[in-house]
Amino acid sequence: MRGWLPILKRELAGYFVTPVAYVFIVIFLILTGVFTFEIGAFFQQGQADLRAFFNFHPWLYLCLIPAVSMRLWAEERKGGTLELLMTLPVSKAGAVAGKFLAAWLFCGVALVLTFPMWLTVNYLGSPDNGAIGAGYIGSFLMAGGFLAIGACVSAATRSQVIAFVVSVVVCFGFLLAGYGPVINVFSPWAPQSVLETIASFSFLTRFDSIGKGVIDLRDLVFFGSLIGGCLVLNASLLDAGKGE
């Protein structure tokens, strides 16, 4: 993990010196507002909670998080700076962790900037703030899961476009892992235990329980394990690309 902090600082600062970061945040805030108030019918429901707000986060992340992750390693490969980065006094694990944490914190900043939603629902009623806090924790963890998958894919290619498309497809599979169309692909030949294992990878199922205010240790372990596993694979893919 040597050198992860300088990498984190450099990467995080890099997000805010370009207009792309601000465009991403503005788009995220606009879309959360549109989905919550227009499509989610926040006011019409007459309930002082943020279920309408959190319900659309998985789908927003499916489109927006791969846009953040696609550049993490693909840009380094295409620009020929990956080899230079590996010659710095930074361990491979430090570089992987630093880049991932910077991108995750950036996504966290965008999520924190939705705090007016929390203020609004408290102004209008008496919501369960514990459930809302759990929803934010679950949303942040889910963003980390999407980001870890995207970083892994980005490490395997020079093309940011390919990284984006493949990340969206893989993340979509994780979202719907517990639902009929995905289970039906495996059900003709896979035993029930395998089907249950596949279903346990569903982001929607995991996030739904946290969004209701129930923070289950198994959900935390799931997201933590997924992020850790993807980062290990991310580092392995960097090794595999040394000969390019």
Image (tube, helix red, strand yellow):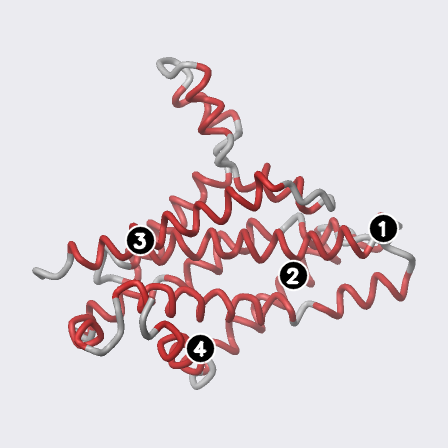
Q: Earlier in the sequence, mark 1 or mark 4?
A: 4
Q: Which is in the foreground here, disc 4 or disc 2? A: 4
Residue found 73% across the figure and 46% down from its top: 213
Whether pointer 4 and pointer 2 mark residues with C-beta atoms closer than 8 Å, the reply is no
Q: Which residue is mark 3?
A: 153
Q: Is residue 102 left or right of residue 129?
A: left
* First reached walking from the N terminus: tag 4 or tag 3: 4
As helix, strand or loop, the secondary structure at mark 1 comes to helix
Between residues 126 and 41, which one lies in front from this camera angle? 126
Which residue is painted at 40% across and 51% down in the image?
228
Q: Secondary structure at mark 4?
A: helix
Mark 4 crowdedness (10 Å alpha carbons): few <14, some 14-19, many ≥20: many
Q: Quadrant of residue 204?
A: top right
Q: Which quadrant holds residue 8?
A: bottom left
Residue 4 percent coordinates (x, y) = 36, 72
Circle on res. 32:
2
Q: Which quarter shows the C terminus?
A: bottom left
Give the residue at x 39% y 62%.
69
**109 and 184: which one is in front?**
109
State how far apart marks 1 and 4 are (Cα).
39 Å
State whether residue 66 is above or below residue 12: above
